[in-house]
C-alpha cells in the first residue's frame, strides 16, 4: 500500500503555527514511507474564504519546504461529487429529507440544554413520509446513522477510542440550499483522493466518529486515523497569540529560518531520544506518526528563538546575506550598493554569531551597508567627546601609512599606538567603533576594519573627525 496523506486547511485565514505542525507531520510521514503528500484547500465557506489566504497558505508551506506532490485541490470545485454521494444515499434509503423548522430545532436544543446533554437531532423525519412535509419548506438531507452498538476507532496515536452509537445523531449532509456540509465533503474528498492516513488535530476526534458513519454507509474502506494533541502555550493553557499562535508568515517576517521552525515544530509531541537538532534528512529517516505522544505539547517562543540562533550560526553566509538584504534596505530606507553587499557577505561570520534572528542580524549588519557619512547614535557620539576624537585623529595618521589591512595587523598597530600614548586599547578602539559603525557596539572592531576595507574605513574616520569641528 502506498501511503497518501493530506493537509486540508481552510482559507479563511493564514497558515497557523498549529496547522504548520500538522502539515509537517503529514509531509514527513508520507516522505518517510515513500508515499504522497497532498494539499486540499477547503474553500466551501465562500463568504469567508479568500484568494489572499489561499496564496498565503501555499506560500507558507513552500517556505517551510512542505510542497505537495500534486497540484492543490479546491474542495469547492468538487461540490457536484459531494452532492452525488448524498443523492446515492437517499436512493438507497441511507439518508432522508428532514423538514424540521428552525423553531423545532431550537426546541430540541433547549430540551438538550436543560437535560445537560449536547444537541442531537431527535430523528423526527427519519421514518416519516415526505408527503407529510409542510408546504414551502426546503428540506436538508440527513444521514441515517447507526442507532445501536458501538463505533470503535483504532487511532494510531490515541489508541482504541469508542463511542456508543446512541450518542451519534443523524447529521446534515446537504443544507436546505442544496450545498454540501463540511462533514460530507471531507469524507468524499478523502475517499476520492485515495487518502490512506488522516493525520490531524484531536479537536476533530468527535467528527471522526460521525464520518465513519458515512464511510460505512457508502461501503468505503476506512483510512487510518491519527489524532494529534493540540499545542498549548508555555504556561500549559490553550495556545493563543500571546504565546506565539501566529501565522507562519509572521515567523518569516520576524526573521526565523524555516529549517529552525520545522525542527522546533517536529519536537513538539515527537522526539528521537535526546536529539534536539534534527536535520531534514534525519527527520525523514526517523519519523513515524505512531511515535507522536498523547500529551499536549507546549509551544515556547524562547526555545524556538534559541534554536533559531543555532541554525543562524550554521547557515551559509551568502544565503544569510541574501535574506538580510531586504530587511537592511528597509531599515536604511535606501538601495544597497554592490560594494555594500560585498561587505555584508564578508562580515557575515562575525555578524551571525551575535544574532538570534534575521531581524537582529539585519539591525546589527546595517552599518556595513550605510552610505557615507553614516549617522551615529547618541552613545557613539559620546565616545568622541573629550579626547576621543583626538585619539582617533592620532591613530588615523598611522592608518594612512598602513597597507596590511588584516584584522590582526590593525590590532597590533592600535596596541602600539595606545602604549605610546599611555592609554588602554579601549581608548582607541571605542572611538574607532563609533566612527566606523555609528554605534557603541559591533563585532570586533579590527574585524570590522578589515571588512570595510582601507578606503571606506579611513573615509568614515575622516567623516567622524570633521563632525567634531
Image (tube, grey):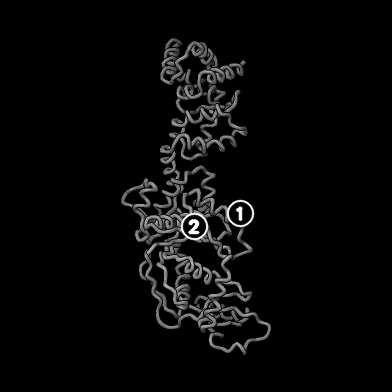
What is the residue that sits farthest to the right in this orientation?
A: 136
Left or right: residue 200 versus residue 368 is: left
The numbered disc on residue 52 is 1
Left or right: residue 400 versus residue 468 is: left
- Picture quadrant where residue 417 is located: top left
The numbered disc on residue 191 is none
Who is closer to the viewer here, 404 or 217? 217
Residue 114 visible, this angle: no
Residue 451 visible, this angle: yes
Secondary structure beneath label 1: helix
Instruction: Name the residue located 45 percent from the left edge and 68 percent from the top edge.
Output: 205
On the image, the x and y values in percent for residue 325 come to 54, 35
Q: Is residue 436 above or below residue 417?
A: below
The numbered disc on residue 70 is 2
Who is closer to the viewer here, 102 or 171? 171
Instruction: Name the residue located 58 percent from the left edge and 75 percent from the top edge.
Output: 174
Amino acid at each position: 500500500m502506498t501511503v497518501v496523506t493530506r493537509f486540508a486547511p481552510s482559507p479563511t485565514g493564514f497558515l497557523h503555527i498549529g496547522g504548520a505542525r500538522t502539515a509537517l507531520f503529514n509531509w514527513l510521514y508520507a516522505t518517510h514511507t515513500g508515499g504522497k503528500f497532498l494539499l486540499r484547500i477547503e474553500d466551501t465557506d465562500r463568504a469567508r474564504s479568500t484568494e489572499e489566504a489561499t496564496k498565503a497558505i501555499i506560500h507558507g508551506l513552500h517556505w517551510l519546504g512542505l510542497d505537495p506532490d500534486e497540484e492543490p485541490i479546491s474542495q469547492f470545485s468538487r461540490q457536484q461529487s459531494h452532492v452525488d454521494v448524498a443523492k446515492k444515499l437517499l436512493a438507497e434509503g441511507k439518508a432522508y429529507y428532514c423538514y424540521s423548522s428552525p423553531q423545532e430545532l431550537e426546541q430540541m436544543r433547549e430540551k438538550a440544554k436543560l437535560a445537560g446533554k449536547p444537541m442531537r437531532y431527535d430523528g423526527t423525519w427519519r421514518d416519516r413520509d415526505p408527503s407529510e412535509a409542510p408546504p414551502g419548506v426546503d428540506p436538508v438531507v440527513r444521514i441515517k446513522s447507526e442507532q445501536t452498538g458501538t463505533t470503535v476507532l483504532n487511532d494510531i496515536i490515541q489508541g482504541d477510542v469508542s463511542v456508543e452509537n446512541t450518542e451519534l445523531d443523524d447529521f446534515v449532509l446537504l443544507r436546505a440550499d442544496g450545498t454540501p456540509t463540511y462533514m460530507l465533503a471531507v469524507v468524499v474528498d478523502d475517499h476520492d483522493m485515495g487518502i490512506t492516513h488522516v493525520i490531524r488535530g484531536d479537536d476533530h476526534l468527535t467528527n471522526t466518529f460521525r464520518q465513519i458513519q458515512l464511510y460505512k454507509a457508502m461501503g468505503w474502506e476506512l483510512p487510518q486515523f491519527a489524532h494529534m494533541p493540540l499545542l498549548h502555550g508555555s504556561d500549559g493553557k490553550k495556545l493563543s497569540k500571546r504565546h506565539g499562535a501566529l501565522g507562519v508568515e509572521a515567523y518569516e517576517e520576524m526573521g526565523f529560518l524555516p529549517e529552525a521552525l520545522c525542527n522546533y515544530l517536529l519536537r513538539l509531541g515527537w522526539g528521537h531520544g535526546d536529539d534536539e537538532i534534527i536535520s531534514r534528512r534525519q527527520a525523514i529517516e526517523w519519523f513515524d506518526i505512531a511515535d507522536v505522544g498523547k500529551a499536549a505539547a507546549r509551544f515556547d517562543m524562547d526555545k524556538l528563538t534559541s534554536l533559531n540562533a543555532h541554525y543562524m550560526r550554521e547557515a551559509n553566509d551568502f544565503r544569510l546575506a541574501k535574506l538580510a538584504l531586504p530587511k537592511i534596505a528597509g531599515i536604511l530606507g535606501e538601495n544597497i550598493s554592490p560594494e555594500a553587499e560585498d561587505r555584508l557577505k564578508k562580515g557575515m561570520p562575525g555578524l551571525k554569531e551575535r544574532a538570534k534572528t534575521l531581524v537582529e542580524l539585519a539591525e546589527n549588519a546595517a552599518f556595513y551597508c550605510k552610505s557615507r557619512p553614516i549617522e551615529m547614535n547618541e552613545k557613539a557620539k559620546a565616545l568622541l567627546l573629550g579626547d576621543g576624537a583626538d585619539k582617533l585623529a592620532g591613530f588615523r595618521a598611522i592608518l594612512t601609512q598602513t597597507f596590511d589591512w588584516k584584522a590582526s595587523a590593525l590590532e597590533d598597530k592600535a596596541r602600539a599606538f595606545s602604549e605610546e600614548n599611555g592609554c588602554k586599547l579601549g581608548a582607541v578602539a571605542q572611538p574607532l567603533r563609533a566612527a566606523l559603525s555609528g554605534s557603541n557596539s559591533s563585532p570586533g572592531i579590527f574585524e570590522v576594519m578589515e571588512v570595510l576595507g582601507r578606503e571606506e574605513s579611513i573615509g568614515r574616520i575622516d567623516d567622524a573627525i570633521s563632525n567634531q569641528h
